[in-house]
Image (cartoon, rainbow, N blue to C red):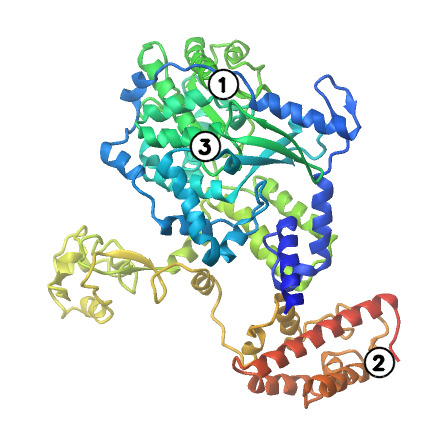
Amino acid sequence: MIYCKATTMEINMLKQRVKLAWLKGGDNCSKIFFRKITARRASQRVYQIQNEDGQLLTEYTAVTGEFVNYFKKLFGGSQRQTQNLDHLQPFARYLISEDEATQITSPFQRHEIKEVLFDINEDSAPGPDGFSSGFFKSSWAVIGEDVCRAVMEFFNHDRLLKQLNTTLITLIPKVQLPTKVGDFRPIACCNVIYKIITKIMVKRMQLVLEKLVDNCQNAFVPGRSISIMSSLLKNYYQATIRKNCLPGALSRLIYKKAYDMVNWDYLLVVLRLFRFPNRFILWVEQCITTASFSISLNGTIHGFFSSTQGLRQGDPISPYLFVLVMESLHLLIKNKIQNDDNFQFHWRCKEMSIVNLCFADDLLLFCKADIHSATVLHGVLQELKGRAGLQANAQKIRFCSQSSSTNTESDSKYFWISTRYVSSSLSWVPLITSKLSLADCAPLILKIEARIAGWNQLKLTYAGRTQLIKSVLSSIHQYWCSVFILPKGVIKLIKGIQFQVGDGTEFKLWLDPWHPDGTLLHRYPHGPLITGLPMDSPLSTVIARGNWQWPSEHHVDINDIVTKLPDIHRSGNDAVIWKSSSGTYTTETAYAVFSSPSNSVEWAPLLHGPFLTPRHNFILWLAILEQLSTLDKPWCNSTNQGCVLCDGYQNETHNHLFFCCTYSKAILHILGSKLRFHWPYTDWKMGIKWASKKWRGSHLVNAAHSVIGCSSLLHMEGEKQQNFSRNLYKC
């Protein structure tokens, strides 16, 4: 028992180090598991670095000192006093009401604290105190009351203990071969208690965030998608390539170390601008001003210093505070344009007042291609730099102009850049004006191929390969699918939803696919004429007191419709739900929709034992289907097809390996004598049929036999592969 606990603790510790979320079950202690730990540790080792003067530092103390001094200087910038921004309130999309302000600072409940804690990933890196969220979750019955008191202490007394707000900065390389300290991204590892506090504050912010932030921003705002911004940019490109369109200009800016440069005083003024309650602003001030930092480098901790500016990457509340800072930029632009009659919008952008689009620290500015309009936007950016400390990264600015009457070089200087052209891929996905072609998808294909090539050398197990495909490779293309419409995928998705009829007020009788036959107008085009019901009639026209009531059921078409009518849910309104028993989307039901129907097989229970790992399941599945790489397969080019586990006189087939081979028989004999494991058949198919009936159910003995059988298959397959590679034979 003690050994099992110690082993589990060690595996959990290693899982935190490896950071491979897609590894499952039996792959936890495989070669790739430990190789990735070693590779990750090696990638984060820093043995030499260049200082600001270009001098190469190789001594350990000099290297660590350079990192500490760099981040001391970065986080210790001079504070700027910011004037009140109340004059921007008329331009704000929404201001927090008194009722909402009361709701934001209303008393917190203990169940909220528990929900937030259990929402934190157990494998996330711990803070300086060394305790991960997994520790707090597993020990909640013992320490839960103390955790709640610690969190409530902050919200009740508006003061944050500095020891809770200590931060460990871990360094993530931004480039493949970092040479300077600036090539590393500082990620803050905060204590779990502090994460709970800020996550609770984030939940309260999200109550009003969508109302406060204009539609020109999509990052971190609940309910918004990057596809909206992509559509706007594609429309811009369509307008730009027109030969007869009016001259327009686009500038793309990425802010330099945006989080690290935010002025605290400006941030607090922005919160007051949107009328956040004073107490909430005090909480934010305590969170950002009481932080202290240490640098984690080469496995040791260096330095201890405080900061005077910036937001921490890794702090749960930082992205949402930065969104509000960027919203203030939008208000500054609106204020400037309102007071300048000579500013001219980009072609067809005036009606929607589109001047800027923003995704986190990635900013796009639109205007007509004239010097005055560019000067106005340049002035706003300079004002934000002076107030908030945000400065664009000159190396990542792009400028594009469609103009026959102005000089692109002249315009571009107002955005601090030389003339460059916006690439066809702005930050996220390709910007094109037509359907995706194979060439447009080249970056996606290359990314997937690179990911596969990187893991190809690690010799993944069968289960590891399937998990890699499901969890990693699929997520890469899903991001593109969220932006581009894929017609075949849409058609399949429609098969997975259904219309639940309620009072009939939300659905159209002829135009919505509420009927099992689909849209009635497509199936019965003469229906409106036959029934006398207009084409845009609501479904409630044929519903009376919770029952169907059609005007005429004597016509063939109407009779056909009536015989297939769905049930009416009298307790609610019309709704579109997922086609499952619960009406809720799940991965299982989605798989059923997208996969073709197939008959169940009698050996299916063998693959779902309670103690089987994915590696066991996969090898057994291949063996049952006789798809293991035996020498009798046509694709095996071996001239000698003799079994490598016995004398080699019999051909290597599935039926021979399991269990006619003398080597496999010897294994069965040992298992039978020591573990009472019984396998009565030498014919493989008969044996599987017997096991499917014998090992059914969740009884411990049946589960143990299933594990023993699968493990035998797995290790025999591994031994066979090793012997084949060494060209040896067992005697």
Between 364 and 145, the residue placed more toward the observer is 145
Say the numbered circle drawn on residue 722: none
x, y percentage for residue 613?
A: 61, 68
x, y percentage for residue 123?
A: 57, 51
- The crowd level at tag 1 (other Cα within 10 Å; few <14, some 14-19, many 20+) is many
In the rendered view, would you say 40 is above or below 50? below
Residue 320 appears in the picture as rendered: yes
Q: Nearer the viewer, mark 3 or mark 2?
A: 3
Q: Secondary structure at mark 2?
A: loop
Q: Quadrant of the N terminus?
A: bottom right
Q: Secondary structure at mark 3?
A: helix
Report the residue at 59% width, 53% height from top: 21
The three-letter code of the residue at mark 1 reads Gly
Q: Nearer the viewer, mark 2 or mark 1?
A: 1
In the rendered view, would you say 245 is above or below 128? above
Q: Quadrant of residue 663?
A: bottom right
Report the residue at 64% width, 87% height from top: 686
Q: CA distance from mark 3 to mark 1?
A: 19 Å
| 432 sits to left or right of 282 | right
Say the numbered circle drawn on residue 646: 2
Say whether marks 3 and 1 touch (CB < 8 Å).
Answer: no
Q: Secondary structure at mark 1?
A: loop
Q: Mark 3 highlights which residue?
A: 287
Q: Mark 1 highlights which residue?
A: 389
Between 180 and 304, the residue placed more toward the observer is 304
| 715 sits to left or right of 512 | right
Q: CA distance from mark 3 to mark 2?
A: 69 Å
Q: Quadrant of the C terminus?
A: bottom right
In the rendered view, would you say 263 is above or below 648? above
Say whether marks 3 and 2 touch (CB < 8 Å).
Answer: no
| 158 sits to left or right of 440 | left
